[in-house]
Image (tube, grey):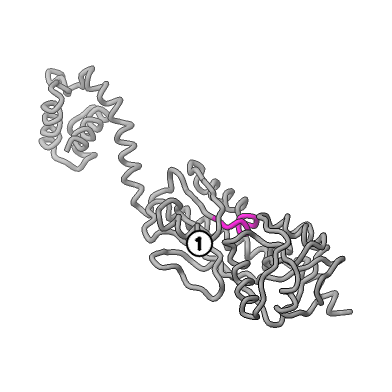
Amino acid sequence: MLFEDLKTLVAVIDHNSLTRAADVLSLTQSAISRRIQHLESVLGLELLDRNSKPPQATALARRIYEHAVPLMRSMNQLLDISREDAVPSGVFRLGLSQVIAEIVLFDAVMRLKAAFPALEVQSHTEWSTGLLQQVSLGKLDAATLLLPSPSTLPANMAGRLITTLEVLVVQSKRRPVVERRSTIKALAEQEWILNPLGCGYRAALNRAMQGAGRELRLSVDTHGTEMQLKLIAAGLGLGLVPKTVLRRSNSYAELSVVDVKDFSLSLDIWLIHPVQLGNLKGAATVFGDAVAESFASVAAGRGRWETVNSRRGSE
């Protein structure tokens, strides 16, 4: 009730008229008067000088007005948080795996800031299992997940499937350690350069090797795809890399792809967010579109990968 009373006082002072305030608030003039009188009773003072025609706000009323206006604004922003059709505001907390962030983060942030300049964007990189947990706990507003394909949307989440990545086995072109066509058992005899524990495609490779009665042998355990590819190009071991990432790598010309007849890996990229996202729904939509367009742009272009393979085919 007090909030509605303050809202009425603000309208009366803004329009300098009980009648115009009643029109703006869709109330009768008598209802406006009752609200002002109730507020005066609560505060223990007169807010309007009724000897004036029309009644004028007192000095104390104007001081209250100065505090009430930002309060009204904050309350309206609070109410907008629950409305999906409202303009995104406040902080938008994004979660991405490192591989996805390397491809899409710059373009996605630029798109978000162009669409919603006042929106604060915070990004966080982690493995997909951790990102899913943080969205579930309300610590992130949206996240991109890498899940072994085929996959489904995690329970109690809203979202969309963005695309599917093909993951390749690569080695040094100058210092190869296996034949171009190989098997999982032959790969198990070599050392690998991979992400630390928690990485989805490291886990898939480990399962494949255990299924063949072998164990994964590590040469280097490190974050950072570009660093991994440099180490692989130097001949320190085999590695796994999404095809779209390989195309963009500075080490591309120094790497060759191994065709493994009994192992293949594809990962689905999902954009997930809580079912009820309120006024951040528009931001999540823009973010998802930016991620999809970044990967579509890479897939549509004739990258170095296709160029090199077309040359091989003509040899």
Report the residue at 47% width, 53% height from top.
283
Q: Secondary structure at mark 1?
A: helix
Residue 186, position as x, y percentages in the image: 75, 77
Determine the image quadrant of residue 102: bottom right
**Residue 95 included in the magenta stretch of the image:** no
Q: Residue furthest bottom?
A: 261
Relative side of 53 to 14, left or right: left
Residues 84 and 104: in front is 104
**Residue 97 included in the magenta stretch of the image:** yes
Q: Amino acid at mark 1?
A: Thr
Q: What is the span of residues highlighted in magenta in the rendered image? A: 96-103
Within 10 angstroms of label 1, few (less than 14), some, or many (20 or more) residues?
A: some
Determine the image quadrant of residue 50: top left
How many marks the image carries: the answer is: 1
51 versus 292 height, above or below: above
91 versus 70 height, above or below: below
Relative side of 217 to 252, left or right: left
Residues 21 and 3: in front is 3
Relative side of 113 to 215, left or right: left
Is residue 280 something one can see in this rendering?
Answer: yes
Residue 125, position as x, y percentages in the image: 56, 53
Is residue 300 something one can see in this rendering?
Answer: no
Which residue does the numbered mark 1 point to in the structure image?
Answer: 129
